[in-house]
Image: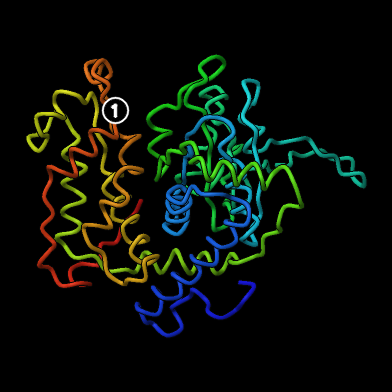
Amino acid sequence: MTDPTPSPDSAADGSDGAAAERLNIAHRKLRAELGKVIVGQDKVVEQLLTAVFARGHCLLVGVPGLAKTLLISTLARTMTLSFRRIQFTPDLMPADITGTEVIQEDRATGERSFKFVKGPVFANVILADEINRAPPKTQAALLEAMQENQVTAGGTCYQLDKPFFVLATQNPIEQEGTYPLPEAQLDRFMFNVKVDYPTAAEELEIVQRTTGGTPEDVNDVLTAEDILAVQDAVRRVPVADPVVDYAVRLARATRVATDAAPAFVKEWVRWGAGPRAAQYLVLGAKAHALVAGRSYVSSDDVKAVAHPVLRHRVLTNFRAEAEGITADTVVDKLLETIPAHDRGALAGTGSSSSVGA
């Protein structure tokens, strides 16, 4: 951090409470720096930071002009991490992302050999701008990097530096020249964040800020070591068994073919969420709790991240579309229908729930 006090690394004192407090302070500093550039969008910023703290990738979906790209690039500037922006276009090739092998000649011996030239994916923060404008073959180039933190080229695996996260943007209304992300690609994103229009007051402030004066500079808040310490602290947060059970029941209730699915799910949903959804519900809840300054997780933390985790994993059918039912509508009804049983559970008790997503 620019200000070394306090550091988010709780390993030194082993105190979960201290980890929560330090992460909360780091979070407030990040919000303050982002607020110098970004007007409003509090929920979007909150969900984006939660995904980063939980070591997850994030997809921001919104119409043009809502500062999606600006938000991600500004976040990268608040952290001393390497940052690369990849502008996805229909002619973008997989090698343009991962890198390629070139023939290199040794001037002394005249021998030729292949050398791997790393692509822009070899950075800590990747902005995949308008990711749905590239064909599926190119989109798939990110799959291995997002899941395994490595790139394979010419039979050799190249490890990516940590921390590593992909922050992608997508325009939901443009259809011409776009390629919908396949479900396997969508499932790699921890959060699908909806970016809505600003309020009238926020839009007025945006116009005033951007049409006069000099934009404010943002300061570094977190280093790579700080981010890794934060992510490790999130993983160490204990979760009571009833909270984990609630996350699993939410995910299972989206699956049409199971007995756990309510009647409205069977009526509106074509395909439900997989096990990765439950993993991300728990991880997101852990990060949400720490950001709030708590070293324990409740079902309310799971509810807080349910929409960004589930909305891109619940596929509605034609009947739902005809009735104007969206994935968010389904998630709303699930949160109303599926009961939480952790009200009587002691805070911080239960298993530590090691999550391998």
How many numbered discs?
1
The outermost residue toward the bottom is 13
Assign a secondary structure to mark 1: loop
Query: Counting other residues with Cα less than 10 Å from the Cα at mark 1, is it few (<14), some (14-19), or many (20 or more)?
Result: some
Circle 1 is placed at which residue position?
326
The quadrant the N terminus occupies is bottom right
Residue 287 lies, in percent from the top left, at 37, 61
Residue 45 lies, in percent from the top left, at 48, 51
The outermost residue toward the right is 108
Instruction: Work out whether 125 lies above or below 115.
Output: below
Of 149 and 72, which appears nearest the observer? 72
Residue 101 lies, in percent from the top left, at 70, 36
- In which quarter of the view is residue 23 placed? bottom left
- In which quarter of the view is residue 90 placed? top right
Q: Residue at x 42, y 85 (%)?
A: 13
Q: Amino acid at mark 1?
A: Thr
- In which quarter of the view is residue 253 placed? top left
Q: Residue at x 46, y 75 (%)?
A: 22
Q: Residue at x 38, y 82 (%)?
A: 14
